[in-house]
Image (tube, rainbow, N blue to C red):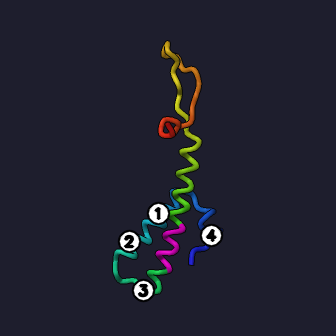
Amino acid sequence: MADPADIAALSFEDALRALEEIVRKLESAETPLDDSIALYERGEALRQHCQARLDSAQARIEAIVAGSDGVPSGVRPFDEDAAR
């Protein structure tokens, strides 16, 4: 089963590499069923970790807002337009 503390300590890149390795193992069709289930559970935990890291990064991204004269006048949240 997935160890949440182990996964939480991973960087996005390391978690993605681990997830890719799990996908390769599952696609090989050589993994026994019980091992496949455990791999799937760890893969899901890794996917959730990666998604949380991406969501966090997106929340920190800001877009520059230009005034009517074209000069930057401030910043706004990255996804402000999507909320409208």
Disc 4 is placed on an element classified as: helix
Residue corresponding to mark 2: 24
Do the CB atoms of the residues marked 4 and 1 lie less than 8 Å apart? no
Q: Position of residue 25 (x, y in %)?
A: 40, 75
Residue corresponding to mark 4: 4
Give how far apart the Cα atoms at labels 1 and 2 are.
11 Å
Query: Which of the labelled discs sits on residue 64, or is there none?
Result: none
Disc 2 is placed on an element classified as: helix
Residue kind at label 4, given as amino acid type: Pro
* Foreground tag (2 vs 4): 4
Please name the predominant secondary structure of the magenta segment in the image: helix
Give how far apart the Cα atoms at labels 4 and 3 are.
22 Å
Do the CB atoms of the residues marked 3 and 1 lie less than 8 Å apart? no
* Foreground tag (4 vs 1): 4
Q: Which residues are magenta?
A: 38-45
Image point 41% across, 87% down: which residue? 32
Image point 65% across, 68% down: which residue? 5
Residue corresponding to mark 1: 17
Residue kind at label 3, given as amino acid type: Leu
Residue kind at label 1, given as amino acid type: Arg
